[in-house]
Image: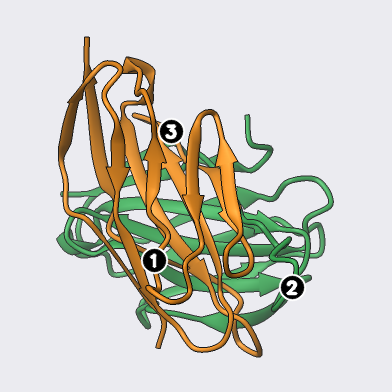
Amino acid sequence: GNSVTQMEGPVTLSEEAFLTINCTYTATGYPSLFWYVQYPGEGLQLLLKATKADDKGSNKGFEATYRKETTSFHLEKGSVQVSDSAVYFCALKGSGAGSYQLTFGKGTKLSVIP
Amino acid sequence: DSGVTQTPKHLITATGQRVTLRCSPRSGDLSVYWYQQSLDQGLQFLIQYYNGEERAKGNILERFSAQQFPDLHSELNLSSLELGDSALYFCASSATVGWQPSGANVLTFGAGSRLTVL
């Protein structure tokens, strides 16, 4: 079945530091890949997505590139802000019949300190 | 505001009881998904409905059931509650169902219902 593995947190960074959150996946076919973010006390919000190999998703300074050869979709941001403190979830949606739902990683909590 | 409305936001109840969580999907979305978020299990897919019909089942216990009504809102019923059922329950909606080559079938999540079983 499909699965997503992302780096364990928590991750604590100083403001303006570089962020990488690793995400690898296992899936058959050609999944779509997503990063969702959950701010404290809120639901999940879509941050970015990529639907085919070598696609780069980007939003709010965050980027992730769909690497089929390494089955990875690492999240990066060049300069984090305190307001980026949240839990980040990597997810995939499989292709083909039965691929109705998202499969999530366990989440990585990011804390950015001034 | 994501457009997906969940009620109640918080619910405290006792073991053995039954509760109902409600979800109104985003306007125009026909598909509703339920997820359970707990500290140890992460986000687990429970069940999905599309236009009133069940389409996919995940790790949903037999004590749990759901339905989607003609107006497209959905309810998740949790019965014979146990301490381990304490979790955040999220509803998400999407416009369509199934495989979309463009990956356009993005899920939009509600703010969740936090259930505490004492």
Q: Secondary structure at mark 2?
A: loop
Whether residues under marks 3 and 1 lie with C-beta atoms below 8 angstroms apart, the answer is no
Vertical relation: A23 (above or below) A80:
below
Vertical relation: B36 (above or below) B24:
below
Instruction: Give me the residue at 45% from left, 62% from top.
Output: A91
Q: Position of residue B28 (x, y in %)?
A: 84, 52
**Which is more foreground, mark 2 or mark 3?**
2
Local packing at callout 2 (Cα closer than 10 Å; few below 14, some 14-19, many 20+) is some
Q: Chain of mark 2?
A: B
Question: Please, what is the three-letter code of the amino acid marked with disc 1?
Answer: Ser
Instruction: Give me the residue at 34% from left, 23% from top.
Output: A80
Q: Position of residue A106 (x, y in %)?
A: 27, 58
Instruction: Check residue A72 in the rendering and tell me which mark sits there, or answer none.
Output: 1
Which residue lies under the disc numbered 2?
A: B100
Q: Which chain is green?
A: B
Instruction: Give me the residue at 47% from left, 67% from top.
Output: A67
Q: Position of residue A103 (x, y in %)?
A: 44, 69
Instruction: Check residue A42 in the rendering and tell me which mark sits there, or answer none.
Output: 3
Whole-Å distance between the Cαs marked 2 and 3?
27 Å
Which picture quadrant has residue B102?
A: bottom right
Tell if the residue under mark 3 belongs to the same chain as the one under mark 1. yes
The shade of chain A is: orange
Q: Position of residue B15 (x, y in %)?
A: 19, 59
Q: Is residue A50 rendered to the left or right of residue B18?
A: right
**Which is more foreground, mark 1 or mark 2?**
1
Question: Please, what is the three-letter code of the amino acid marked with disc 2?
Answer: Gln
